[in-house]
Image (spheres, helix red, strand yellow):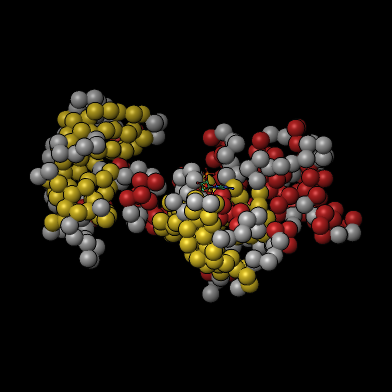
C-alpha cells in the first residue's frame, strides 16, 4: 500500500442538523495520507459545515470522525493534528511575518532556538524569508495568503483544511496560487482538504474530488473520472459544460423527437427514460453531412462567443429545447461559415456519449 492509499481521516455516517435544516446528511468519506482532496459543491451544500466538524469546531449530530482509527469526538480543536486556514487569513496586523508565523507555535512551549529554527525553516520553504520583518499591510494578497499558509504549516499538522482559500484573490492571482498550493502540498507531503464552489479550481488542484449536493456526496473520484464519467446529471452539469438530450432508451441509444443519439454502450439495467450527454469539445462542426457511424444533427448557429483560445457556438437543432453547445479551438474556427445563422452539422463519435439516468 502506498502512502497515498492509507486512510488518515475516516468520516463515518456523519450528519449535522441545525434545527430543521440538515446541513450534512449521512456522509461517509475516507481522506487519504498525502492527497489533495477537494470538497466541491454549490452554496449551501454543507462543505463548510463538514470542514468545521473535521477541525473540531462543530460536533456531528450523528456519526463519527476518526483519525488513524481513533474517534476524535472528545479531542478539542487545538489538540487535533489538523489545522484550518481561514479565507480571511486572520493575520495580526501589528506583528511581522515572522511573529505571525511564530504565533502558530505558541502552544508548543518550544525554547527560543527551536522556535526560531522552525520559523526559519518554514519561511524558506514558503519563500518568505525576504519578507520576515514586514507587517501584513506591506504584503500583496498572494504573499499574505502564503503567510497564513506558513502559519498553519509551521505546526506540522497531519491535515490542512482550507476553506475557500483563494476566494478573495483576482482571477490571475488565483490561478497562480492554485499551482502554488499544489506545489506546497507536494513539498510538505501532508493531506490538504480544500473547500471550493469553483469546479475549475477543484479540477486543477485536487487528486480526488467529492461533489456534494444537499448535504450528501453525489460522487467521489479523480478529476478525470468525474469529468469523463459523471454519475448523474447534477455532477455532469456541475463539472464543466455538458449537452443533455433527454429521451427514451432504444437499442444502443436514446431517442427523442424522431431523432436518436447513439452511444458506445448502454449501462446494464437502464431502460425507459434516460438522458444522453456529450461534452461540447467532443462535437465537430461541418457544412456537409458527415459520413460514417457518427451522431449527426443539422442545425443553425444562433450564437458565437470568442474566448481567445476557444470559440463557443450555440447551434439550434430541431427537436431540442436547448441549443447544442459546441466548443472548438479558435485555430480551427472557420469564420466564413461559423457565424450567426450559419447552417452546420453537429457530429460526434457515439463512444463519447454518456447515458445518465433521467
Ligand atoms: P457556502 O459555499 O455558501 O459557504 P456551504 O456549502 O459551505 O455553502 P454550509 O455553510 O455548510 O454550506 O451550510 C449548509 C447549510 O446549513 C445551509 O443551509 C446553511 O444555511 C446551514 N447552516 C450552516 N451553519 C448553520 C448554523 N450555524 N445555524 C443554522 N444553519 C446553518
Apparent side of residue 273 relative to residue 232 in the rendered image (left or right)? left
Name the spot of residue 199 as percent of width and height, x first.
Answer: 46, 46
Instruction: Name, please, the residue furthest toward the left.
Output: 258
Residue at position x 14%, y 36% from top?
Answer: 318
Figure check: 153 above or below 140: below
Question: To which quarter of the image does residue 164 belong?
Answer: top right
Looking at the picture, tell me which residue is in the foreground, 328 or 190: 190
Name the spot of residue 242 as percent of width and height, x first.
Answer: 31, 44
Instruction: Name, please, the residue furthest toward the front.
Output: 19
Whether residue 92 appears in this view of the structure is yes
Figure check: 158 above or below 246: below
Residue at position x 89%, y 59% from top?
Answer: 111
Figure check: 335 above or below 65: above
Residue at position x 58%, y 41% from top?
Answer: 166
Instruction: Name, please, the residue furthest toward the right.
Output: 112
Looking at the picture, tell me which residue is in the foreground, 189 or 167: 167
Name the spot of residue 305 as percent of width and height, x first.
Answer: 34, 29
Residue at position x 82%, y 60% from top?
Answer: 108
Total numbered badges shown on the rendered structure: 0
Whether residue 282 appears in this view of the structure is no
Looking at the picture, tell me which residue is in the foreground, 326 or 334: 326
Name the spot of residue 103 as percent of width and height, x first.
Answer: 80, 49
Apparent side of residue 38 relative to residue 112 in the rendered image (left or right)? left
Looking at the picture, tell me which residue is in the foreground, 253 or 74: 74
Amino acid at each position: 500500500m502506498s502512502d497515498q492509499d492509507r486512510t488518515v481521516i475516516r468520516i463515518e455516517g456523519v450528519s449535522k442538523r441545525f434545527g430543521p435544516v440538515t446541513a450534512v446528511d449521512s456522509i461517509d468519506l475516507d481522506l487519504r495520507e498525502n492527497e489533495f482532496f477537494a470538497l466541491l459543491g454549490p452554496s449551501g451544500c454543507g462543505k463548510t459545515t463538514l470542514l468545521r466538524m473535521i477541525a473540531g469546531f462543530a460536533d456531528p449530530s450523528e456519526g463519527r470522525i476518526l483519525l488513524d482509527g481513533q474517534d476524535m469526538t472528545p479531542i478539542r480543536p487545538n489538540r487535533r493534528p489538523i489545522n484550518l486556514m481561514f479565507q480571511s487569513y486572520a493575520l495580526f496586523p501589528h506583528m511581522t511575518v515572522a511573529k505571525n508565523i511564530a504565533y502558530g507555535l505558541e502552544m508548543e512551549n518550544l525554547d527560543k532556538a527551536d522556535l526560531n529554527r522552525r520559523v526559519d525553516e518554514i519561511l524558506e520553504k514558503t519563500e518568505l524569508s525576504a519578507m520576515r520583518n514586514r507587517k501584513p499591510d506591506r504584503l500583496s494578497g498572494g504573499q499574505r495568503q502564503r503567510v497564513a499558509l506558513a502559519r498553519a504549516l509551521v505546526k506540522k499538522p497531519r491535515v490542512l483544511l482550507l476553506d475557500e482559500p483563494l476566494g478573495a484573490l483576482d482571477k490571475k492571482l488565483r490561478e497562480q496560487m492554485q499551482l502554488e498550493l499544489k506545489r506546497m502540498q507536494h513539498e510538505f507531503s501532508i493531506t490538504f482538504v480544500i473547500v471550493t464552489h469553483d469546479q475549475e479550481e477543484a479540477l486543477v488542484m485536487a487528486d480526488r474530488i467529492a461533489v456534494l449536493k444537499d448535504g450528501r456526496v453525489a460522487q467521489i473520484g479523480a478529476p478525470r473520472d468525474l469529468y469523463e464519467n459523471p454519475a448523474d446529471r447534477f455532477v455532469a452539469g456541475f463539472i464543466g459544460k455538458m449537452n443533455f438530450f433527454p429521451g427514451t432508451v432504444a437499442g444502443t441509444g436514446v431517442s427523442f423527437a424522431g431523432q436518436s443519439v447513439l452511444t458506445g454502450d448502454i449501462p446494464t439495467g437502464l431502460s425507459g427514460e434516460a438522458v444522453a450527454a456529450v461534452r461540447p469539445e467532443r462535437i465537430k462542426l461541418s457544412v456537409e453531412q458527415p459520413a460514417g457511424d457518427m451522431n449527426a444533427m443539422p442545425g443553425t448557429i444562433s450564437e458565437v462567443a470568442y474566448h481567445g483560445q476557444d470559440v463557443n457556438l450555440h447551434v439550434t437543432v430541431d427537436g431540442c429545447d436547448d441549443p447544442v453547445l459546441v466548443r472548438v479551438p479558435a485555430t480551427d474556427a472557420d469564420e466564413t461559415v461559423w457565424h450567426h445563422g450559419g447552417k452546420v452539422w453537429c457530429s460526434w463519435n457515439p463512444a463519447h456519449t454518456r447515458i445518465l439516468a433521467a
